[in-house]
Image (spheres, helix red, strand yellow):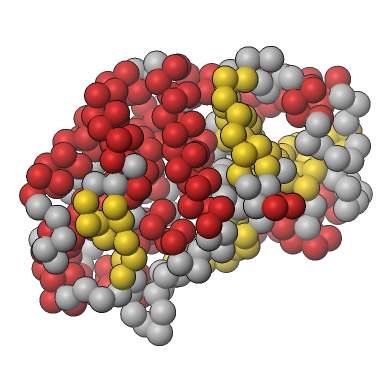
Amino acid sequence: MPIKHTLKVDLDDRGYPIYIGTEMLDQADLISRHVHGRSALVVTNSTVAPLYLEPLEKALDTANIRHDEFILEDGEQHKTLASVEAVIDLLLTNRHDRNTTVIALGGGVVGDIAGFAASIYQRGVNFIQIPTTLLSQVDSSVGGKTGVNHPLGKNMIGAFYQPRCVIADIGTLNTLPARELSAGLAEVIKYGLICDADFFNWLEDNITGLSNLDQDLLAQAVLVSCQNKARVVEQDERESGLRAILNLGHTFGHAIETVMGYGKWLHGEAVAVGMVMAIDLSIREGRIDEDVRQRGVALLQQADLPVIPPKDISVEQYLEAMSIDKKAVDGQIKLVLLNAIGEAFVSADYNQEKLLQTLNA
């Protein structure tokens, strides 16, 4: 079984392993050890199913696990309560009991929908993450955030619900469209900016190889990203403080996704621009110097990511969308800013006029 790396998210009885490697989807041993009952529901989408559903089903058959499939339409616009309800309808129709396991096979949208359905079906059933995009392997599959969007705001309906395991098969990235790979690299770069300057330096040296799908480099990037995220989640599982640094660029980015319409900008694209905006405000606040902007923008551009916001969003639209962000408290917008590469902090104590300057710029 070609598992290259294994690490643990240490959350007491809610802790779980992350497996990173290749050719893991058809490994009955690996899958079955985390399916505690004799039934499962695989939630995937119309893009991933033709590529990777068959080997996973073969593994479940080998392990004598009864299974059903639910195939979602692909795209952020389908990350809704209606999709969650459809998953639950199938669970009920096919008489899945409290010992069933929901398996998410796909990117972040699939994982969020499947995880939220698992968290509320019969007050919680087992859940496995098998992320097939770089963004989901390094970010959304780890840490237990599940949920769906609302027309007024992204990820506003959901729950913290940890999976039993995460199986990150690097081989699935070979079929990822270039735009989706770049979107995932935005979240990888984020870890370097918020808490790991050495990793940021490594990314500057290896971004071309990552973009060219070098399997060893990708496995290393996924490992270090997951190590950084696990370290933060272990200290603050429910985002009461430290975990919010994982949202560098997200308050700006979520506003872009919400105003432009879900699916028009990929999440990672919006986050890339959001990180540039956070760097801009950090410079205006006197926290960092221009060199950080130059290095950050250069790395994002090398990853083929946008660094300029859409021109048709007004300052008023930004402020309205940002005020609904989950980190906002009593109408005050909290932002993740930088003191240096590798040193992020969360604050509402910034100059409002300088925020307006960033939004206008």
Whether residue 318 sits left or right of residue 359 in the image: it is: right
Nearer-the-camera pick, 203 or 57: 203
Please name the residue shown 44% across and 17% down the image.
216
Residue 320 visible at all: no
Q: Is residue 29 above or below residue 46?
A: above
Residue 122 visible at all: yes
How many marks are shown on the rendered structure? 0
Please name the residue shown 31% across and 70% down the image.
347
Q: Residue furthest bottom?
A: 330
Whether residue 65 sits left or right of residue 186 in the image: it is: right
> Which quarter of the figure has residue 203?
top left
Image coords of residue 6 (percent x, y):
60, 29
Q: Is residue 314 above or below residue 277?
A: below
Whether residue 107 sits left or right of residue 15 in the image: it is: left
Q: Residue furthest left?
A: 290
Image coords of residue 85 (percent x, y):
71, 58
Nearer-the-camera pick, 299 or 231: 231
Please name the residue shown 78% across and 36% down the image.
34
Whether residue 199 sits left or right of residue 290 in the image: it is: right
Can you say which quadrant of the picture contains the N terminus?
top right
Can you say which quadrant of the picture contains the C terminus?
bottom left
Please name the residue shown 16% across and 39% down the image.
295
> Which quarter of the figure has residue 63?
top right
Nearer-the-camera pick, 66 or 20: 20
Image coords of residue 166 (percent x, y):
63, 37
Image coords of residue 182 (percent x, y):
34, 33
